[in-house]
Each structure stands twice: as C-alpha cells, then as structure tokens.
Amino acid sequence: MNQASSTPDKAVLIDMYRKMTLAKQNDEQARKVIMSGKLPMIYYSPRGQEVIPAAVSVNLGAEDYICTIYRGIHDMLAKGVPLDSLWAELAGRATGTCKGKGGPMHITHPESGCMVTTGIVGSSMPIANGLALASQVRGEKRVTVAYFGDAASNIGAFHESLNMASVWKLPVVFVCQNNRYGEHTRFEKATAVERIADRGAAYNMPGIHVDGNDPLAMYAAAKEAVERARAGEGPTLIEAMTFRFYGHVFGDADGYMDKAEKEAAMAADPVPRYRQWLIDEGYASDDELTTMEDETGKRIRAAIDGALEAPWPDESELYTDVYVNDFSAA
Amino acid sequence: MAQNKVTTLQAINTALHEAMAQDDSILVFGEDVADPEEGGVNGATRGLSTEFGESRVRSTPISEQAIIGAAIGSAMAGMRPVAEIMLMNFSTVAMDMIVNHAAKLRYMSGGQTAVPLTIRVTTGAGFGTAGQHSDYLEAWFAHTAGLKVVTGSTPAETAGLLKACIFDDDPCIFIENLPAYWQKGEAPEPGQTIPLGKARIAREGSDVTVVTYGPQVAVAEAAAEQLAEEKITVEVVDLRTIQPWDRDTVLNAVAKTGRAVVSHEAVRAFGVGAEISSVIHEELFDQLRAPVQRVGAPSTAVPYSKALESAFVPDADKVVAAIRKTLK
Ligand SMILES: Cc1ncc(C[n+]2csc(CCOP(=O)(O)OP(=O)(O)O)c2C)c(N)n1
Ligand SMILES: [Mg+2]
C-alpha cells in the first residue's frame, strides 16, 4: 500500500472497502447464478478491478455523473445504483432499472448519476463531455467521470473527446481501467504507447499513471482529478493499472491469456489485500469487516431472489419509450 | 453419397482458407482475427494467420474507422482485403469510410479507382445482447449506391456467396447471422462460388411467394411447412444478394402465384421489404390478387428481456399470418 500523505480519514477508508466488497461479492454471486443456469446472461466480469471505482466514487457525490461500459457493474455499484433494480434489470424484469429493455450492458439509473452504460467501445467519453458541458454552461459544480478500457484508447472517440474536453476545460475525469487486454488482444499488440497516460500530453491535459489496485494511490489520483474538474480547471486522464480475472466475457476459454500473469494477478487480489491492511493499520477489526461482508452478501442474495421472482415485462412494453409519446411502433 | 454436415462457422472458415490459398492479394484483418487472439472471438478466422502468416492476417486495434480505411486503401492499391467488423452495429463507427468512401470512390473518380473489399459483419437477435449488438442494418447499406449487400441462408450458401464477394471487384457488405454460426447444414462443394445478383428458389409452391434472405429463409420454410398441412403451398425465394437484387427471379416467382410476402428480421419500416414490395406493385399490379404484405421487426430497438426479444423477432407465426392476409 502506497501510504501517501493524503491518506483519507477512517470513514472514507471504510467506505472504500464497503464499495469494493459489494462489487466483489456481487460478481461472485453473478457468476454463481449464471453457472447455476437460473439466469443465463452475457456477462463481462469486472472482478479484479473493484478498487478503481471505489476510490473514484468516494470523491463523488450523488449529483455527479458517470458514464460507463459493459464491464461496469463495479462502477455502477460504487456510484450507488441500487441492487434490487440492478438485478431485476440483469434478469430482464419489468422492475429493472430500464424495465428490462437495456440489460447488463446498458444500465441507466439517473437517480444515482449513472447516465449511460454503453456496449460500444469508446462511446462513454463523448457523452461524458456533453454531460459536463451542461454543468459548465449552467455553472454547476458537478463532475462527470467517463470509465473505459485500455483498448478503447485506440478508437477515434477517445482522441476527439480528450481534445474537446481540454479545449473547453470541461469538468470531466477520464478513467481508463487498463486491464492489459481488449477482448483477446494483448495491450502491447494494439497500442502504440507504453502508457496511455502519456496520451494526455497530446491533448494538453494531465495524464496520471497509477496502480489502480492500490486504494490509497488510486484515491489520491482520483481526488486530484475530481478537485481539478470541480474547480473549473479542466479534465484529467487517469490510467489505472489493473487486471480482469475472468477473461473478456465470462466463460471464454481465455487460452489467449498468459497463464502466469493471470495467476500472479489473482494471487495479488487487491480486495483481500486492502482488507488485511485495514486490520493491520487498526482501521477495522476482522469481526467488523466480516459483519459488513455478511450483511452485504445478504443484500445481494435478496436482490437476486427478488429479481428472479419479479414479473416479466408485458409484451406491450416492447412498443413504449421509443418516443416521448407512444406511437404505433408495431 | 452421404453429405458431410458442417456449421456455418466452419463453412466460412473453409471459404476464407480456400480464397487465401487461391489468391495472394487477399488480406484478412479485424479485431482478434489472428491465431494468438484465437482466430476471432467465434473462431471464424481460426488457422488463417498460422497458414498464411501475420503479414496477411492481422489482428487490429479497436479502431473500426481505421480498419475500413485500411481496407479501402489496400483495395485501391491492388489487394483484396476481407475486413471483419465484429458486429454489424460497430460498422456505424466506420460509416464515413463505408458510405462516403468505399461506396463512392469508383463513381466519383469516373471509374479510375476500384475498391474490391469485403466487409464481413455478423448480427442477429436471440442472445440477449440488446440494442447495440443485434441490429440488422442492411437497408442502410442497400440504400447507399455502390455497395453490394449479400447474405447466405445455409452454411454452403454462405461459403459460396462469401467467396463471390471476395473475388468481386466492388465493395461488398457480407452479413452473417450470429445465431446461425453454430447451425449445421450440408458442406459446400470445394471451390464452389455462387454468383452475386442471382436469387434462388429455396422451396417451390404455387399459392403464395415469400421473398426473404438470411436467417428468415428458414423461418419462411417453417411457415411453409405449417401451411402445407392445409394444402397451401408456399414458394420461398432466397434473395442472397440484397442489393443489387434479382428482380427477374422475384417478379417471375410472384407473377406465378399472384401473392407475395416480403420478410426480414430488420425493422419493417423503411426496410428492404418496402423497396421490394413497391417494385412488385409497380411491375405486377394487374397480376396481383392481394396487396403485398411485409414482415419485419417493429420500430423499436432490440430489447434485452427474453420476454420482449421473442416478441420483437419475426417468427414463423408472423410469416404465416402475413401469408393468410394475402389469401383473404
Ligand atoms: C466499436 C466497437 N468495436 C468492437 C466492439 C467489441 N468489443 C467489445 S469489448 C471489446 C474490448 C474492449 O477492451 P477494453 O477497452 O480494453 O475494455 P475491457 O473489455 O478490457 O474492459 C471489444 C473489441 C465493441 N463493443 N464496440
Ligand atoms: Mg481492457
């Protein structure tokens, strides 16, 4: 753990852990329910990447916005998307965040600031700019975070968005979760720079390269970027180094991955490591954390059970929400 | 002789192998297509980079615009690139390259340059991938002059048409149906290509003609089976090439029955069916015994929930209902 001078106070440290264990356990339950056959869905596991949104989100308020991607359930949970309607959406039920129309790759929950979840690589960033533009024009202090992957930094939308955000000094934080792979392609094979953070320089914005699995370092990077955005000083690019434990899509054979690299990453699981640190440093006792974990696990299981019992959307729902007023879409 | 059964994926893979072996100017590139990346997320290009090398078979960055741009440029300079855009929806990121450039460079250069490229895309509802991963956008491409838009309905058809696209001198959008990847059918004849612009009669009948393509051919055949029990015989025309489409075969088939249904998985409104239906009315008005009916998806995004997705996709029952309307 990188014990920086900016170590946050105890409440924040514990809150970060609460978000991490929520995302980690949620992922474990998701994989379990998929394997059981009770809820078949295409699932992009964020296991291993929980520290990043946990550390970002403790620097955000409910009014702040995020745009995330298909591998973004950890981002959503950290931002406060409620478990019950999230799970109902994953199950395709009428009570889901999007009435079952969006599904796991497209969760939207404006109440918690989760404005867009995109299935298109690179598309979180241009829209984050627009959300931030609205805040800027209205003189609000709101910050927008755009989450995306390492491979997304090779698409035009990344470059266009960073340039525009910098020219307009938009209150955006671009958080790249560099998990070393884009689908089956290794980072080095598809990306011309060693560090995505270096691309910030091309757009005259600070580029921070940080260990995204180190909660204190990640917290410090996020704090700096969020404060800069809130102060009207413009965007920041954060490249948070991490690893995805369960391949691109859960169930893929991951034969394209370096076994040793993956095993080492899993052995260095950042969530239990942080837990131990909290105990060692006297921020929490084992019992306290166990209680928190148990209670979190119960909430997740209740959300899943509730989702699987929830009503399916009525067929008539297929035709609603196309426009503000219904029309005959059939 | 007992025919060998293969999946559509295997047929595509074999077609690509055959084409690359036959012509050194064929390049294959796209996201994850080389073997270190497992020869494509579904394995369509598996083995190609091992056999033909990573100079000709390249995994690309996630950069659809640059992928199609590189395909256009290399095609103009004498290569025959086969670019893979993993899912049809992602082609929207490369629309400038496809619509403003690939489609038009021949025409706008007064015929001086050619763009003999093939863009392979896959799509289709049924896997719960929702609104950004399962659209059929063929009407967008068919509406753009200069593009050929092609799709197969069986493994052998897919292989033969894909090879025709690869060796064609114009830009071709080759649409594959994702759920059909793992369906089996008769293996293609080695070396066989199927000419572009020629439809096929997939099933003969004399009461109603269903014009369709891609995965909806099987749906139309299932509808025909249902109606056969009532002694209603349905002719099914598989367009194969959506644009430029085979007007002669379609119009002859409709003239024979006097009744037509046009069916596709894409959204019905402003779809391919609208064009075909209009031409049928224009050309055969006095021979029609009923207005042409169209079957297609509603004007909504593809929904996630299984309960809604199954209502979205045009199934055999909807084709049967449309056929019945023409028989009233
Ligand atoms: C424009 C576009 N092209 C291709 C895809 C298919 N695809 C989905 S995820 C992905 C890899 C993205 O990798 P990265 O940005 O590193 O994020 P990660 O999945 O590793 O979190 C690809 C190629 C897509 N969704 N959108
Ligand atoms: Mg990645």
Image (cartoon, rainbow, N blue to C red):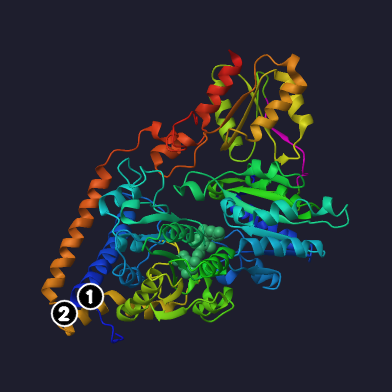
Q: Earlier in the sequence, mark 2 or mark 1?
A: 1
Quarter the N terminus of chain A occupies: bottom left
Residue closest to the eye, B274 or B170: B274
Element carrying mark 2: loop
Residue bounds of the magenta highlight:
B194-204
Q: Is residue A21 left or right of residue B9?
A: left
Residue at 65% over, 40% down: B139
Residue A86, image x, y percentages: 31, 52
Is residue A151 found inside the magenta-colored segment of the image?
no
Q: Is residue A245 above or below residue A95?
A: below
Residue closest to the eye, B179 or B61: B61
Residue carrying label 1: A13
Instruction: Report how far apart the C-alphas of labels 2 and 1 lie in the structure.
Output: 8 Å
* Identity, as a three-letter code, of the amino acid under mark 2: Tyr
Q: Chain of mark 2?
A: A
The answer to the question of whether label 2 and label 1 lie on touching residues, with beta carbons closer than 8 A, is yes
Residue at 75% over, 14% down: B286
Residue B198, image x, y percentages: 77, 38
Residue at 66% over, 63% down: B67
Residue B74, image x, y percentages: 76, 65
Determine which quarter of the picture holds residue A31. Answer: bottom left
Element carrying mark 1: helix
* Identity, as a three-letter code, of the amino acid under mark 1: Leu
Residue carrying label 2: A283
Q: Is residue A136 left or right of residue A296?
A: right
- Which secondary structure type mostly characterizes the magenta part of the structure? loop
Q: Is residue A81 left or right of residue A106?
A: left
Total count of labels: 2
Residue B278, image x, y percentages: 70, 26
Can the viewer see residue A102? yes
